[in-house]
Amino acid sequence: MELERAVRLAARLLIALAAVRGVTKAIKTAVYVLRWLVGATSREDAAKETAKRFLNGNGLLKDLSTENMQATTLAHAGCEPCAATGALSPPIQLASTYERAQNLSYPRGFSYSREKNPTRSRLEDALATADAGVDAAAFASGSAAANAVFQTLVGGHVVMPDDVYYGNRQLLHTVFGPWGLGTTTIDASNLDEVRKAVKEAAAKVRDAQGRVLLWLETPSNPNLKITDIRRACEIAHEYGAAVLVDATWFSPAVCRPIELGCDLVLHSVTKYIGGHSDLIGGAVVAGSTPLATELFARIRSIQHYGGAVLAPFDCWLALRGMRSLAVRMAMHSRNGLAVAQFLDSHSAVTRVFYPGLESHPGHEIAKSQVKDNFGGMLSFLVATEQDAIKLTATMQLAKRGTSLGGTETLVEHRSSVEGPDSQTPKTLIRVSVGLEAAEDIISDFAQALDSISR
Ligand SMILES: Cc1ncc(COP(=O)(O)O)c(C=O)c1O
């Protein structure tokens, strides 16, 4: 138990006791309890030190470190024993409606599953905990989650990276633009551009009383640009703008943007959280800032009345994915770095984008956000578009397909997936590095690169 939590508990106890037993007795009891809690805290710290010494001493942390990845919290995600049966895997509650009491109340807190469902509540609680947030709302897809965020902002303005998931760019431009939501596109890895755009947007919407949202996606898709989240949030907040980070590519096991100062986090749960290419889902997690509280209340009512909720079985799949997220992300990161280093050393590859490489311009910032786990997403350039297409056609172990975050390595010629207004170089190949043995993935790339080497 942390000291801060111990002090908070003792303070609550003190107030409660003072009301019942008088102030002097209350202070004595609280001091006794606080001493006991502090003792327990130092015992816990000492035990953690012993465990670390043991693991380090025996070289057990070297290969697949899950330090800083909330492995323990995630391994128990949504696993509170079921009150009715004691089941340790979360029950899937399919009911659409719930019994109402004679006095017209809903004594168990559930009335209708579009509004609130027990399996979805478990997932939302687990997501909020994993991201160090205070609440979360689960949607039918990552795009439905983004849609809900944009709906809360109509009349306002979104500052968005030039390199962003193309579906979100399309959603903003084709759906929300005509509805009166302004957009500015910037290179979000450049903080001067962030400041200029947020300042101008704040001036623009002041009269309309609209909100400005700085939308960040870091690493960006598909060029893996890195934004200094902490500094970008400070800048945005100076002008009263809220900040959302689409953290799909790192996942909560690798990076928790709320701890770096942002207001909202978005996940396509479809990707690493689900982890097995078998579900479509999304979520928005709220931090505790006043801006987060204001925007999340609107997002929750859009979820509630709009109804694009995640179905109970998909919530269960997402919870199952979360329980192995830390160890999967450690392995994705280890394989990602190995593949990036191999590609970087190959003469047929002209450039590799992976924040774990020391040569990446955002490496130091990324390192401060993720420690040593840089995730499993990378992209790289080859000489010509024909080479890029031939290379993906020649891969044998890796599968050709869009999406990311599954156990299998996926390669895609990204610009042809994004369509005619894609800004992605035609020579770029995006890779979701999977959980196969690193040497097998690398030898697959080696044979495919040989086919285009001149
Ligand atoms: C970074 C990012 N955000 C959001 C989405 C949209 O998620 P979904 O496909 O679950 O709607 C994607 C999908 O690829 C993505 O890569």
Image (cartoon, rainbow, N blue to C red):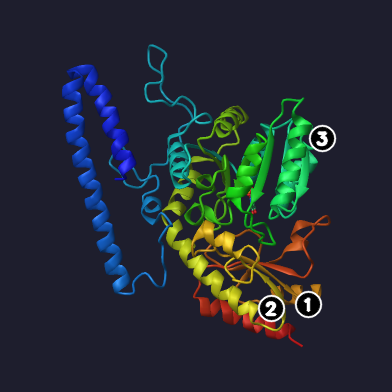
Mark 1 and mark 2: Cα distance apart in space: 16 Å
| Quarter that holds the C terminus | bottom right
10 Å crowding of disc 1: few (<14), some (14-19), many (20+): some
Which residue is identified by label 2? Answer: 394
Q: CA distance from mark 3 to mark 2?
A: 43 Å
Q: CA distance from mark 3 to mark 1?
A: 39 Å
**Foreground tag (1 vs 2):** 1
Give the amino acid type for the residue marked by disc 3 in the picture: Pro
**Is disc 1 placed on a helix, strand or loop?**
loop
The reply to whether the C-beta atoms of the residues labelled 3 and 1 are less than 8 Å apart is no
Q: Is residue 162 left or right of residue 337?
A: right
> Looking at the image, which residue is at 43% across and 43% down?
129
Amino acid beneath label 1: Ala
Instruction: Please tell me which residue is depicted at 40% across the width and 61% down the height of the picture.
Output: 67
Image coordinates of residue 59 in percent, x first then y, are 33, 74
Pointer 3 residue? 178
The relative height of residue 317 versus residue 405 in the rendered view (above or below) is above
Provide residue 29's location: percent of width, then percent of height: 17, 29
Image position of 18 (left or right of 196): left
Q: Which residue is mark 1?
A: 383
Q: Is residue 45 left or right of residue 193?
A: left
**The residue positioned farthest toward the front in the image shown:** 24
**Quarter of the rendering containing residue 72:** bottom left
Image quarter of residue 390: bottom right
Going 47% across and 67% down the picture, which residue do you hit? 331
